[in-house]
Image (cartoon, helix red, strand yellow):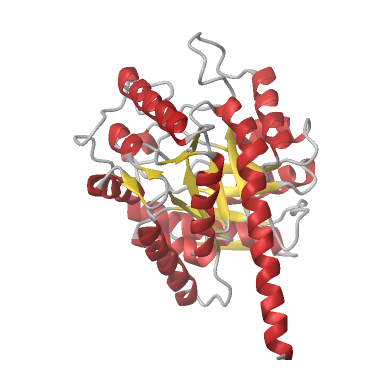
Amino acid sequence: MSVEFIGMIGAKDSDSAAPGPAVDPEFTLRFARVHEEAGFDRVLIGHSSSSPDGAQLAAYVAARTERLGLLLAHRPGAVFPTMAARTFATLDHLSAGRLAVHVISGGNDAEQRRDGDYLNKDDRYARTDEFLEVVKRAWSEPEGFGHEGRFYRFDDFRSEVRPLQQPRVPLYFGGSSAAALRVGGRHADVFALWGEPLAETAEQIAAVRAAARAAGRTEPPGISVSFRPVLGRTEEEAWRRAHGVLDAIRSRGTAGSFFDRGRPPLPLGPSARPENTGSQRLLAAAAKGELHDRALWTAPAAATGAAGNSTALVGTPETVAQALLDYVDIGVTTFLLRGYEPVRDAAEFGRTLLPMVREEAARRARTAMSAGAAGATG
């Protein structure tokens, strides 16, 4: 089986201590090309209420890379679904069919309100469900159509542009709540989870598949899991680096997530009670212990209040590759990997981690095919 790897890029160098412009085109392009050269399949372009516009960043990167796929984060609510459908379809053509869309309903009320969205969490997921219904129909409807729903209403919509990819642009979807499972189980091509221990991840995968079956699907979504690997030439070096990362997080007094940009530091530690279920699950795992399974380290999640994807896999490339393969064994198809030194780490992952995982996954697939063929003829 093939394993998909996704990185994450931004519009400025978040590692630099020196202040810089909110949009640094030269850095953005270098960041994207590092991922392309490292062999990542896609890069996520995130979304927050203060970040630069992701669709424009995606178009800029698409025009200056050759192979790299783009995963554009989008929050329903800020743009009508008919406009979003045309935007995504246009980007799909401009990128020569390299676009995917990561749909996020939003897990923090204060963050949503910064963009004027005052719906509660359950209503946001209900709106996302309707939004995706409209977008998918806009991509496929040959004639004009109207819609009257709870959140959107329009008449005689017609679009000249449809996705280059067929049947449509791939949809990724994130969340861990019951509402997220229901909506993502219905619509997602890939369902994104944060990096929990193996047992809890297996439970989440089973819940996603059950939601897909309940929605009448015969093929379940792929499963993505996010980690922040910390590598070293030896186990000791990896752990020294990991504890240095933790010290830096604590000394900054900020969670260091994508969503912290442009606002005062978030509260850290056990007193920080996140609203979203995914972060609550990470904190629950951290409360059980810092180390899980082969290499999963939850201390960064505990230190940040689980702001964003905040669990690490720590060890040599060989150790972390085997840890990722443990997740492949329970049904994970995609990994979103983001280092704490993003540019340096992306290059390092490409030299060591990605080839190791791909080679072993391919070897296992060949072995399974051989065993299946032998069984069929035996």
| Residue 122, above or below 337 | below
Res 67 quadrant in image: top right
**Quadrant of the drawing holding the N terminus:** bottom right
Q: Position of residue 130 (x, y in %)?
A: 49, 59
Q: Residue furthest top?
A: 18
Q: Nearer the viewer, residue 197 or 184?
A: 197
Q: Is residue 80 visible?
A: no
Does residue 31 appear in this view?
yes
Q: Where does residue 200 sit, x and y in percent of width and height?
A: 35, 59
User: In x, y percent, where is residue 291?
Assistant: 33, 45
Locate residue 313: give its quadrant: top left
**Residue 36 in the image: above or below residue 76:** above
Residue ID at (31%, 23%): 250
Q: Is residue 260 left or right of residue 273?
A: right
Is 160 placed left or right of 308 in the picture?
Answer: right
Q: Would you say 274 lies left or right of 35 here?
A: left
Name the residue at 61% across, 37% down.
349
310 or 50, which is in the foreground?
A: 310
Q: Which quadrant does the C terminus fall into? A: bottom right
Residue at coordinates 67% horizontally, 34% vertically from top-left?
35
Question: Residue furthest toward the bottom?
Answer: 378
**Residue 97 as seen in the image, left or right of residue 266:** right
Name which residue lies at 74% across and 44% down: 90
